[in-house]
Image: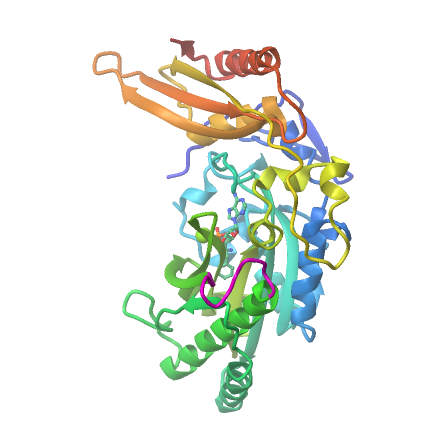
C-alpha cells in the first residue's frame, strides 16, 4: 500500500504556489526544481514545439471545446478516487506523486478533470495541461510533462448508436496513407472486456470510433514525416492495456529510435465517471496523450529535457504552427559518477526519491540515472544500493570538476536527508 514516509525536502511551513499560500505537512514532497516549473506552461507558448503541437491537434478536432488553463493543484480525491482508482493503487504513494500536503497534490494526469468537464455538459472536448510524476530519469521521462485529454460522448440509445455508426463510416473513408503502417488489436476481448452495463455492440462501435479518430489524428500529424516511405514506413501499434477509469483500454506506441515509444492511453469511459458527472445516459471514449513524446518523434528531438531549454539555439529553430526537423547544435561529452551506500535501518530510499534528489541538485545536467545494484545484508537487514548518474549539459561542455561538485552535493544531501552510509 502507499508509503507515507516523509521525505519533505523543504523546511518551510508553507508554500506559495500560483499566488496562493498552502501549508506543508508530514507528507510534503514537492521540490524547488518542480515548483519552479509550475508557472511556465510550455503548452501555452505559441512558438514552442509543444504550443504548435497543441494547436495542430486542436485544429484536427475543430468542433471540440478546447481547454488549457486549469490549475495543476488538485485533491487526491479528484486525481484518483473520482476515477475509480483502488485505495491501494501505487500511484497514490508519496514515492510516485508530488504532494503539497495531505489534502492537495499536483495532478498526475489530465484525466483528473474528466468529471468536472463532463459535468459542464461538454460532449466533445480537448484539455491540455502540465502534469507531474515522480518517475525514473532518462531521455523520454521527465517529472513534469504535458498531456492532452480528449473525449467524446453520445446518448446511450439507438439514436446515439446510429450517430457513431455514421461517423465511423465517414472516418474509415479518409484513412489511407502509404508511408505509415498501423497494427490493430480487437476492440473487445476477454482480457479487455465490455463493461457489464454496456451493450457490447455499442461499446465495440465506440472503441472503433476511438481508434478511427486517433488513427486519423496520427496520420494527420505523422503523414508528412521525413524519412517514412512506402518501403520504410513509420510503424504504429495498438495494444491492450488496463486503466481503472476505462474498459476496454488501449495504448498506442510508435517505433522511434529503435524502440517502441508509448504516446497515449485511451479507452471506453467507465460508466461510473459519467454517473458521477451527472450524465449517466451517455456513453463514450477518452484518451490522454503525451505531447512531449509525440513532439520528439515529429521534430526529431532526441532528449525530453530539451523542451525546457531556454537556449536560443533550441528556441530559434521553431516557428509557430510549423513542424521542422530539429538540428542538434552539439552533443557535449557526458560524464558518469557512481554512488554506493547503505540505507539507514528506519528510512527506505525509493528509486524515485533518489531520482528526485538528483534532479533537484543537478537540474537538467542529469541525463539519466541507472540502478546498478541492490541487495539486502543477510545479518543487519540493511539495504545496499548503487546508482550510476550520467551528467551531460545540452548546451555547453561540462567539466569534470563541475560534475564532481554536483556529485558531492548529491552525496551530502543523501547523507543528510536519508542518513545513508556511503560505501
Ligand atoms: C494516463 O495518464 C491516462 N490518464 C491516459 C488515459 C486517458 C487513459 C483517458 C484512458 C482514458 P499514462 O500513464 O500511460 O496514462 O500516460 C499517458 C501518456 O503520457 C503516455 O502514453 C506517455 O506518452 C506520456 N507520459 C507518461 N509518463 C511520462 C513521463 N514521465 N514523461 C513524459 N511523458 C510521459
Ligand atoms: Mg501508460
Residue drawn 53% across the image and 66% down it: 286
Name the spot of residue 134 as percent of width and height, x first.
51, 37
The answer to whether residue 278 is seen in the rendering is: no
Residue drawn 57% across the image and 37% down it: 99
**232 magenta-colored:** yes
> On the image, which quarter does residue 120 sit in?
bottom right
Total numbered labels placed on residues in the image: 0
Viewer-closest of 95 and 129: 129
Name the spot of residue 215 as percent of width and height, x first.
51, 70
Name the spot of residue 367 as percent of width and height, x first.
54, 30
Name the spot of residue 307 as percent of width and height, x first.
65, 42
**316 magenta-colored:** no
Above or below residue 126? Residue 259 is above
The answer to whether residue 353 is seen in the rendering is: yes
The quadrant of the image that shows the N terminus is: top left
| Residue furthest front as drawn | 231
Viewer-closest of 305 and 281: 305
Colour pattern: rainbow
Viewer-closest of 344 and 25: 344
The quadrant of the image that shows the C terminus is: top left
Q: Main secondary structure of the magenta part?
A: loop
Residue drawn 68% across the image and 57% down it: 323
> On the image, which quarter does residue 128 sit in?
bottom right
- Which region is colored magenta? 224-234
Viewer-closest of 180 and 169: 180
Residue drawn 48% across the image and 68% down it: 230
Amino acid at each position: 500500500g502507499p508509503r507515507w514516509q516523509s521525505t519533505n525536502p523543504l523546511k518551510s511551513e508553507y508554500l506559495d504556489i500560483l499566488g496562493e499560500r498552502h501549508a506543508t505537512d508530514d507528507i510534503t514532497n514537492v521540490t524547488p526544481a518542480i515548483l519552479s516549473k509550475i508557472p511556465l506552461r510550455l503548452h501555452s507558448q505559441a512558438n514552442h514545439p509543444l504550443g504548435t503541437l497543441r494547436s495542430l491537434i486542436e485544429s484536427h478536432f475543430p468542433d471540440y471545446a478546447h481547454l488549457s488553463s486549469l490549475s495543476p493543484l488538485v485533491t487526491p480525491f479528484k486525481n484518483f478516487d473520482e476515477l475509480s482508482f483502488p485505495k491501494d493503487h501505487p500511484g497514490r504513494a508519496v514515492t510516485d506523486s508530488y504532494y503539497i500536503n495531505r489534502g492537495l497534490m499536483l495532478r498526475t494526469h489530465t484525466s483528473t478533470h474528466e468529471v468536472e468537464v463532463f459535468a459542464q455538459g461538454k460532449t466533445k472536448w480537448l484539455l491540455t495541461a502540465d502534469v507531474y510524476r515522480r518517475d525514473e530519469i532518462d531521455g523520454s521521462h521527465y517529472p513534469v510533462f504535458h498531456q492532452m485529454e480528449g473525449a467524446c460522448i453520445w446518448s446511450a440509445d439507438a439514436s446515439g448508436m446510429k450517430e457513431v455508426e455514421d461517423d465511423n463510416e465517414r472516418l474509415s473513408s479518409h484513412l489511407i496513407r502509404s508511408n505509415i503502417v498501423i497494427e490493430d488489436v480487437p476492440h473487445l476481448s476477454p482480457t479487455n472486456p465490455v463493461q457489464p452495463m454496456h451493450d457490447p455492440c455499442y461499446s465495440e462501435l465506440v472503441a472503433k470510433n476511438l481508434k478511427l479518430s486517433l488513427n486519423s489524428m496520427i496520420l494527420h500529424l505523422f503523414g508528412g514525416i521525413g524519412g517514412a516511405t512506402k518501403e520504410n514506413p513509420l510503424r504504429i501499434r495498438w495494444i491492450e492495456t488496463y486503466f481503472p477509469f476505462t474498459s476496454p483500454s488501449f495504448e498506442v506506441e510508435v517505433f522511434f529510435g529503435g524502440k517502441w515509444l508509448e504516446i497515449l492511453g485511451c479507452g471506453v469511459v467507465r460508466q461510473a465517471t459519467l454517473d458521477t458527472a451527472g450524465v449517466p445516459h451517455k456513453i463514450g471514449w477518452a484518451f490522454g496523450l503525451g505531447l512531449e513524446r509525440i513532439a520528439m518523434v515529429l521534430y526529431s528531438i532526441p532528449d525530453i529535457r530539451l523542451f525546457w531549454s531556454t537556449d536560443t539555439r533550441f528556441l530559434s529553430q521553431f516557428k509557430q504552427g510549423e513542424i521542422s526537423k530539429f538540428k542538434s547544435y552539439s552533443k557535449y561529452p557526458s560524464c558518469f559518477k557512481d554512488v554506493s551506500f547503505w540505507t539507514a535501518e528506519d528510512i527506505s530510499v525509493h528509486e524515485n526519491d533518489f531520482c528526485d534528489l538528483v534532479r533537484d541538485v543537478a537540474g537538467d545536467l542529469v541525463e539519466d540515472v541507472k540502478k546498478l545494484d541492490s541487495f539486502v545484508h543477510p545479518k543487519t537487514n540493511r539495504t545496499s544500493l548503487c546508482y550510476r548518474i550520467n551528467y551531460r549539459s545540452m548546451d555547453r561542455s561540462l567539466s569534470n570538476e563541475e560534475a564532481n561538485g554536483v556529485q558531492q552535493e548529491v552525496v551530502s544531501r543523501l547523507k543528510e536527508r536519508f542518513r545513508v552510509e556511503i560505501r
